[in-house]
Image (cartoon, grey):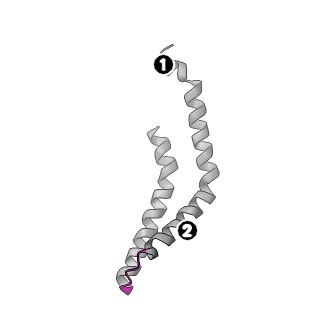
Amino acid sequence: AITVVLLVGGPVLAVSLVVGLAVSIFQALTQIQEQTLTFIPKLVAIAAVLLLMGPWMLQVLVSFTANLFNNLGSYANF
């Protein structure tokens, strides 16, 4: 379960971190302190990652769920 969480959430969090860092550096260099300047690029980048990697993420989650239900008896010790 932890591996699936890292696989599914990792790309979105990594892109958000990189974009946030890039915008913060840009703000520090230009001394622009606009709040929406950090929010909108992150939103666009996360949407792009979800559009590009969404089918793969869904496949990982469906595979995990199917495996969980197939092995439910062994997990419950039936």
In the image, what residue occupies the spot 38% across and 75% down?
Answer: 24
Residue that numbered label 2 is attached to: 44
Instruction: Check disc 1: other Cα within 10 Å, few if <14, some if 14-19, many if 20+.
Output: few
In the displayed structure image, the side of residue 50 where residue 3 appears, left or right: left
Residue lying farthest to the front in this orientation: 35
Indicate whether 37 appears above or below 54.
Answer: below
Rounded to the nearest whole Å, what is the CA distance between mark 2 and mark 1? Answer: 43 Å
Q: Is residue 34 magenta?
A: yes
Q: Position of residue 59 (x, y in %)?
A: 62, 44
Disc 2 or 1, which lies upstream in sequence?
A: 2
**Is label 2 in a helix, a strand or a loop?**
helix
Q: Image quarter for residue 73?
A: top right
Give the amino acid at mark 2: Val
Q: Position of residue 30 (x, y in %)?
A: 38, 86
**What's the magenta region?**
30-35
In the image, what residue occupies the spot 38% across and 84% down?
Answer: 32
**Is label 1 in a helix, a strand or a loop?**
loop
Indicate whether 68 appears above or below 49.
Answer: above
Give the amino acid at mark 1: Ala
Residue lying farthest to the right in this orientation: 55
Residue that numbered label 1 is attached to: 76
